[in-house]
Image: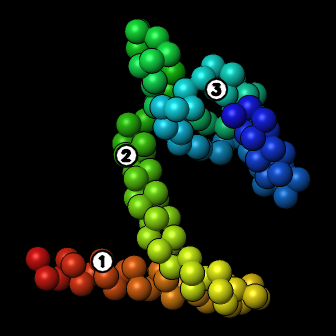
């Protein structure tokens, strides 16, 4: 993970994106001291769920349960977008068409969500 984390953070910095104060949610699979220390060194606020297999005792690292729960909404939306991947990949020859098809997917997702709420 250290290698890939370094690649991603290097890419972000080269793109002009500041890492200082960046908030990242990680699941328990990423609970490692070296990842926490690297994130801290870069100024990244790492919200990492505690992995009980790493130790028996509860750790005293920062962890915001509410923000971690909100992570599910993002993961779910990404999964919904993946269901439109065949459309997005087939026609996204330009940035404009890629953005347009993403907006179309967002609209379809929102309409489905609103339709479910209304029928309850």
> Which quarter shows the C terminus?
bottom left
Q: Position of residue 42 (x, y in %)?
A: 76, 34
Residue 60 in sight here: no
Is tag 2's residue or tag 3's residue first in the polypeptide sequence? 3
Q: Secondary structure at mark 3?
A: helix
Q: Earlier in the sequence, mark 1 or mark 3?
A: 3
State if disc 3 and disc 2 touch (CB < 8 Å).
no
Report the side of 55 relative to 65 (left or right).
right
The image quadrant of residue 93 is bottom right
Q: Are marks 1 and 3 in contact (CB under 8 Å)?
A: no
Return the residue at label 1: 113
Q: Would you say 120 lies left or right of 24 here?
A: left
Q: Residue furthest right?
A: 14
Residue 90 to residue 19: above or below: below
Q: Secondary structure at mark 1?
A: helix
Q: Which residue is mark 2?
A: 69
Label 3 Cα neighbours within 10 Å, binned few <14 / some 14-19 / many ≥20:
some
Q: What label does residue 36 carry, if any?
A: 3
CA gap between label 1 and label 3 equals: 37 Å
């Amino acid at each position: 993970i250290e290698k890939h984390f370094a690649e991603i953070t290097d890419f972000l910095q080269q793109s002009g994106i500041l890492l200082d104060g960046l908030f990242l949610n990680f699941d328990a699979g990423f609970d490692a001291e070296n990842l926490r220390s690297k994130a801290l060194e870069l100024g990244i606020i790492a919200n990492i769920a505690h992995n009980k297999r790493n130790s028996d005792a509860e750790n005293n690292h920062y962890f915001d349960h509410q923000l971690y729960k909100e992570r599910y909404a993002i993961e779910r939306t990404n999964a919904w977008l993946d269901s439109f991947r065949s459309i997005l990949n087939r026609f996204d020859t330009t940035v404009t068409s890629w953005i347009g098809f993403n907006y179309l997917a967002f609209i379809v997702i929102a309409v489905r969500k609103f339709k479910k709420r209304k029928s309850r």
